[in-house]
Image: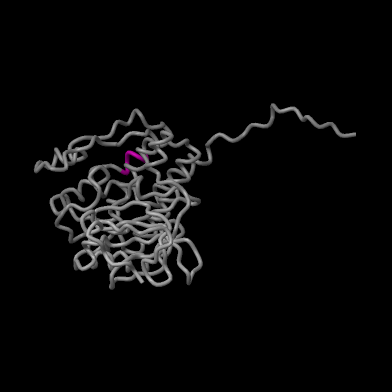
Amino acid sequence: MPAPLTAESETERRWRLAEGEDFAPGRRALARLGGGHRYEAYLAFDDRMHAIVVAKLVRPHLVADRQTLSGLGAEARMLDRLDHPVILRSFDAVLEGPRPHLLLEHLEGPRLSSLIRRHGPLQPEQLIPLALQLCSALHYMAQEGVVHLDLKPANTIMSGPPRLIDLSVAETLEQARALDRPVGTDTYMAPEQCEPGRRGGVGPPADIWGLGATLYRAATGSRAFPAGDPNSDDPAARWPQLTSAPDPTVLPASIAEPVLACMDPVPEHRPLAAELSEALEPVLKAQAKPRLSGLKPRWRGP
């Protein structure tokens, strides 16, 4: 049975699950992975699946909060709706009881953001396959009428293949077009996400913008736009991408044009995911291959 909340955990607004402690019947915590404002993640073991998974738990002080539970339910439904090799899988959703949570696929590999921070920009042989895999996921989501709205390096797991995670703010196309408030992560938001309504409706082109900003960061190690002031009431101060453009000179020449096209201020001018994939495939084919002509054989048979 789950342990009752303590005064300490209420104060800190986080679960303090010990290794091996059950947080739900047949599910026990192994290690805390981290967390956000509303949720925290634990590496866990599920007895029924007999497998290591990730549990995304609602924080203790929000287990009765209707908005938080509604958001968790919406994410669960979105994950159930989508089935693609590059998109994170969900195995179960518990939306009631003392510890509401999602049971998610455990992915081996670092976040793209961590990889860049530790080792710098990706090499071309890593970058182009990553771009093509994410194009595949975005093409599929657009066909399914879903907009991710938060594509960024921190939501990309560098496993094999790369995986797109965190659909907590994803919306159907109809819901996205009706948005009347900013949704996403400031640095990676398309202009129409920053000011929905004023710049047209939000749709799949917003995800293409996020992909372009992600690839720019992966290719250069730097953000496409400077960080804004999240507390400013001036849209241009909060979102520099509304009035500035990324520096094209720091991008590798072979990918500069398609990546910059993703961040065109006009949504209709951005490429579709399939078009971006077609533009990048020749770059993949043109990447240097090992040259063997100059090698001399060491073995000499009889």
Decide whether the magenta segment is chiefly helix, strand or loop: helix
Does residue 19 appear left or right of residue 205 in this picture?
right
Task: Identify which residue is drawn at 39% across, 41% down.
Answer: 114
Instruction: Looking at the picture, tell me which residue is in the foreground, 212 or 72.
Output: 72
Asked if residue 32 is positioned above or below residue 223 in the image, the reply reads below
Q: Which of 241 and 157 is in front in this view?
A: 157
Query: Magenta stretch containing residue 245, yes or no?
Result: no
Q: Does 298 appear above or below 38?
A: above
Q: Residue at x 35, y 47 (%)?
A: 154
Q: Quadrant of the C terminus?
A: top right
Q: Where is residue 125 in the image (x, y as percent from the top left)?
A: 50, 39
Q: Extreme front residue here?
A: 7
* Residue 139 position by quadrant: bottom left
- Is residue 249 found left or right of 51 in the rendered image? left
Give how far across and how far down residue 134 sits, in percent: 41, 50
- Residue segment shown in magenta: 258-262
Q: Residue at the spot x=48%, y=39% of the render?
A: 283
Near-viewer residue (282 or 34):
34
